[in-house]
Amino acid sequence: MVDLSRAKVASQSSIYPCLDDACNKFYIASNAVDRDLSTCTRNMYIGENSITNTVWWRVDLGKIFSIYSINVVFKNYGGYEMRQRGRFAGFSLYLSNSSLRIIDFLCYEDGKELPPLNFTTPCIGYGRYVTFYNQRSDKIKYPDGYERRTIIELCEVIVNGCSEAGVYGENCNVACPKNCQEQRCDIVNGTCLGCLPGWSGRFCENICQGGWYGFECKLRCFGHCRNNAFCNHVTGQCDNGCADGWKGLYCNKQCKDGYYGLDCKFKCSGHCQNNGPCNKQTGHCDKGCEVGYTNLLCNSVCKGGYYGRNCSQKCSSKCIDTCQHTDGSCTCSYGWMGINCNQECPSGYYGINCNEECSLHCGFNDTCERYNGSCPRGCQEPYTGPNCFKMTGNCPQRTDSKDSILPIPLIWFLGLILSVVLNLCFVLIASFKHFR
């Protein structure tokens, strides 16, 4: 062990007032680290009839060290040892990495017994600052022997420890366990003063139990690593990737709707029942497929000749080709109509999907046959042909039900008008010649 505080920078809360500036050097804070017992600090009185009730002295070691013990030598006046012990009594010692006392580590706190004027205590820990603190309050009943009005006189404060980080032992020559946090361990027995993330145990020799990670192994893995593996005991990440349906370094994010599988890189079929999302792990449509689709992924249409929910319905035998896989609709064969071709053509229509109109010239005012439009008992005069759309002679022929020929009565009426006009013309011409 080495003396870590010798000749280091020291400070204190107050200094005993002198009548001249020359004597102030006898009470300065650095007197406690000069290794000269004849020079001591002295602060202003605290306690009864004093302007303050607390006092502190601090040394800055310059950097963080592993500390073993602190030795404090209090001023001893011949014949006044008990008074001095009563002044010394009630003090505390703190370690910290900051000069702010709010984050200090309490290393020693005095009790009822009066301390010896040459006092040493173990103070095992890490720190840069060592602080001596004492108080006297009117509101506190102190043990017997305590001086209620006191003055602090520190002649030496010796901080012993290892000058190098990451070692321990009497000679500071044994390396701390490798998984100690910041390579800090107990200066006596080498137990870690904290473990690196992912490790536990007195010497940080144990990895976190499966499913846990981080500082003190207090963080639980999210549980979605590939092949049910545990997450990394240090980072919590899934080193070999995520289980199907999950993504992210920690595998804590589900695939967004519409995607599934490894790294969420597969798109759902889009044909799950009621436009629902597929299973994010398997891509299956757990609630079934929308009509016209089949298999677990609902990514196959019904095979030819089937349609509907679960492809359980057969297409109509009256479809010309296969029906639609969704609703069974199709192009109907001759003489049939409707979504599923289950309706006969209505009177006056025939053919594929009943799209053709029958001739108006079937004999005996019959309607045509619904398959091919033929007139079962022949045609009216002067029409002919299997569907009675043609006329005999040189008259224009009707080629289909949508072409039209002027009816015979209308032709007679037009001929009569033409005859009257011609006769009127002849009469006018004859009259004109007569008057000439």
Image (tube, grey):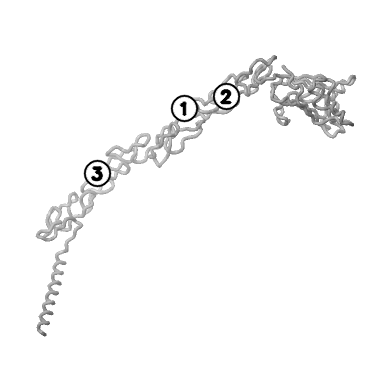
Q: Residue at x 46, y 26 (%)?
A: 227
Mark in the foreground, 3 or 1:
1
Q: Could you tell me the amino acid type at mark 2?
A: Gly
Q: Nearer the viewer, residue 22 or 207?
A: 22
Check the image and report above or below for 322 versus 29: below
Check the image and report above or below for 336 versus 44: below
Label 2: few (<14), some or many (≥20) within 10 Å?
A: many
Q: Position of residue 38 (x, y in %)?
A: 85, 21
Label 2 secondary element: loop
Q: Nearer the viewer, residue 382 or 309?
A: 382
Left or right: where 107 falls relative to 387: right
Q: Residue at x 49, y 28 (%)?
A: 225
Check the image and report above or below for 43 versus 121: below
Mark in the foreground, 2 or 3:
2
Check the image and report above or below for 405 versus 334: below
Q: Position of residue 172 (x, y in %)?
A: 68, 16
Q: Which residue is mark 1?
A: 226
Distance from disc 3 to disc 1, alpha carbons, whole Å, reads: 51 Å
Q: Which residue is mark 2?
A: 198
Left or right: where 69 falls relative to 153: left
Label 1 secondary element: helix
Distance from disc 2 to disc 3, alpha carbons, whole Å, reads: 70 Å
Label 3 secondary element: loop
Q: Residue at x 72, y 16 (%)?
A: 1
Q: Which residue is mark 3?
A: 319
**First reached walking from the N terminus: tag 3 or tag 1:** 1
